[in-house]
Image (cartoon, rainbow, N blue to C red):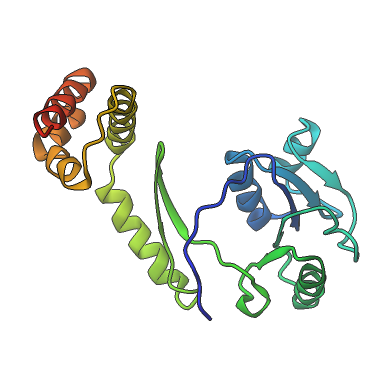
Amino acid sequence: MGYYPIFLEMAHRPCVVIGGGAVAERKVEGLLGVGAAVTLISPALSAPLAALARAGKVRHVAREYAPGDLAGCRFAFIATGDREVNAAVAREGGERGVLVNAVDDPAQCDFILPAVVRRGELVVAVATGGSSPALTRAIREELEAHFTEDYAVLAEVVAEVRRELRQRASVPDGAAWRRALDADLRRLVAGGKREEAKAHLLERLEAEQ
């Protein structure tokens, strides 16, 4: 298989999650976190999923999967552990052009989900093509230790500076950015000196012009 890494805009995209247990919880949590419109198909739900349904955050169809359930959706996530259901959903997905992910069943997947480290707008994803989930988790844990929470602030500072420079019609090249993202900037951010970090970055980039 050849997996192409890609980040998709999921806000308001209709998605179906089939299953009502702990694995489905993780899928739903991730989808809601990026603003997807989630329909949950399962005769029973875990307590957290039931709470989301009561709050109107997901649409709940209280029955088993049935052919036709993927109509109008863009992505389907199967979290039942039932290979027959996986195969049936994958068939319907193929017929309707819906991309399908089946947990622990790569043969029925159009795409796999990477392990993810999120620090604000900074997102780092890692995958092993579905061949070694344990290795993927281990690498994610290493990345979590490296990319500390202050990287979220660093990403915000860089985005603000980039916007300000573009408003001035100033567009530093990639090499200038790499030089400006120096150890001093990282130390200022790590020390909680956000405004000083921003001023430092602007100064470095303006000096490159």
How far across and how far down the image is residue 1, in percent?
A: 53, 81
User: Please, which residue is most extreme toward the top here?
Assistant: 195
Front one among 204 and 43 = 204
- Residue 43, image x, y percentages: 87, 54
Tell me where residue 6 appears, x and y as whole percent.
49, 59
Residue 204: x and y, percent?
11, 30
Position of residue 20 relative to residue 157, above or below, is below
- In the picture, measured across the screen, residue 134 lies left or right of residue 79, that is left
Query: Is residue 101 or residue 198 the one in the foreground?
Result: 198
Figure quadrant of residue 74: bottom right
Q: Quadrant of the C terminus?
A: top left
Q: Is residue 190 above or below residue 63?
A: above
* Residue 107 located left or right of residue 121: right
142 left or right, relative to 93:
left
User: Is 83 rendered above or below residue 198?
Assistant: below
Tell me how many marks there are. 0
Name the residue at 69% across, 64% down. Answer: 99
Classify residue 38 as left or right of residue 158. Answer: right
User: Toward the viewer: 194 or 115?
Assistant: 194
Residue in the image at 66% along x and 43% along y:
36
The extreme front residue here reads 169
Q: Residue at x 16, y 36 (%)?
A: 186
In the picture, residue 143 is in which quadrant? Answer: bottom left
